[in-house]
Amino acid sequence: MRADGHNTQRFYIPYSFDGAITGTVPANGTLIIGFELVRHDAKLESPLMQLFSNPSVLNTIANVTFYGHDQVGNTVTVTGSVSVQFADFADPS
């Protein structure tokens, strides 16, 4: 999602995608787990591919939703948002 309203996938933002991850949150505990926020393929598609030769920065907000079940089978869903900046941050060395 972009703040300027240009939200057409492939033209203004990378394609959204679904993935799978498994983990168990202990009772009264916390689960720390890593997940992919930007697919590697997305870096070779529009609009990210154009950043290789363009010094601009693409500011976006990624909405991430996790779906699961609790210990008795109730559906659990949580959504969070994270700011993501895309640019050609190549290592100059």
Image (cartoon, grey):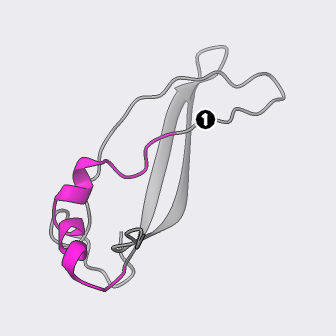
- Residue 38, compared with residue 12, is above or below; it is above
Is residue 21 on the magenta stretch?
no
Q: Report the side of 16 relative to 47 (left or right).
A: right
Left of 49 or right of it: where is 19? Answer: right
Residue 40, how many percent across, how many down? 29, 48
* Residue position for label 1: 33
Q: Position of residue 81 (x, y in %)?
A: 53, 60
Q: Which residues are magenta?
A: 35-57
Q: Secondary structure at mark 1?
A: loop
Q: Nearer the viewer, residue 85 or 9?
A: 85
Looking at the picture, which amino acid does disc 1 mark? Ile
The answer to whether residue 14 is above or below residue 32 is below
- Whether the magenta-drawn stretch holds residue 54 is answered as yes
Residue 7 seen: yes
Residue sticking out furthest to the top: 72
Residue 91 lies left or right of residue 53; in this view the side is: right
- Judging depth in this view, the residue of 6 and 57 nearest the camera is 57
Q: Is residue 15 visible?
A: no
